[in-house]
């Protein structure tokens, strides 16, 4: 059974795809916490960071973050967050990085 995010990529579920290459895609978060809140998702269905294989195209996530931040005009800064597991509040078991920006961000996160 494809994950929620894979079903958005295939068009089965609606979503705004803002970036795509052969390794990753990115969608606007349905419940944004900042003016820009984009999820960067590897096309490979890895459950989360703690189950990341040793080998792979993981650098593609960072490269996409840089490119999307430029695309979104986040010249004053942005944050990239990966929630892993229950304590971090991960709700979708398909690895994704939250690209958040467009306002000053507090630290530390909750
Ligand atoms: P996490 O809690 O780190 O697993 O993040 C999952 C994110 O997916 C949350 O920020 C949700 O708002 C977001 N989300 C859930 N369903 C959708 C959807 N259909 N389209 C876009 N984003 C979604």
Image (tube, helix red, strand yellow):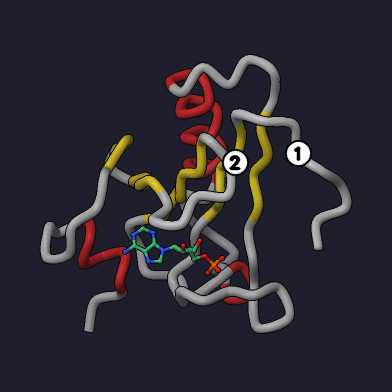
Q: Quadrant of residue 1?
A: bottom left
Viewer-side residue, 64 vs 18: 18
Secondary element at tag 1: loop
For label 1, the residue is 105
Number of marks drawn: 2
Q: Position of residue 53 (x, y in %)?
A: 55, 68
Viewer-side residue, 26 vs 108: 108
Q: Is residue 71 above or below residue 88?
A: above
- Which residue appears at 23% of the width and 60% of the height? 8
Instruction: Give yes or no for contact between labels 1 and 2 (Cβ–Cβ under 8 Å).
Output: yes
Badge 2 residue CB within 8 Å of ligand 1: no
Secondary element at tag 2: strand
Left or right: residue 97 compared with residue 21: right
Left or right: residue 75 compared with residue 8: right
Q: Position of residue 17 (x, y in %)?
A: 27, 43
Badge 1 residue CB within 8 Å of ligand 1: no
Numbered mark located on residue 100 in the image: 2
Image quarter for ligand 1 equals bottom left
Label 2 packing within 10 angstroms: few (<14), some (14-19), many (20+): many
Viewer-side residue, 37 vs 10: 37
- Which residue appears at 47% of the width and 25% of the height? 67
Left or right: residue 12 compared with residue 73: left
**Which badge, 1 or 2, is on the more N-terminal residue?**
2
Q: Position of residue 103 (x, y in %)?
A: 67, 30
**Mark 1 → mark 2, Cα distance in angstroms:** 9 Å
Q: Is residue 41 above or below residue 87?
A: above
- Which residue appears at 82% of the width and 43% of the height? 106
């Amino acid at each position: 059974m494809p994950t929620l995010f894979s079903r958005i990529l295939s068009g089965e579920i609606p979503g705004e795809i803002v970036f795509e290459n052969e390794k990753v895609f990115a969608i606007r978060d349905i419940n944004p916490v900042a003016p820009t809140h984009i999820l960067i998702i590897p096309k490979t269905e890895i459950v989360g960071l703690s189950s990341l294989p040793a080998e792979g195209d993981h650098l593609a996530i960072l490269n996409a973050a840089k490119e999307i931040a430029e695309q979104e005009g986040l010249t004053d800064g942005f944050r990239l967050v990966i929630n892993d597991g229950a304590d971090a509040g991960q709700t979708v078991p398909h690895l994704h990085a939250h690209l958040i920006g467009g306002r000053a961000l507090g630290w530390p996160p909750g």
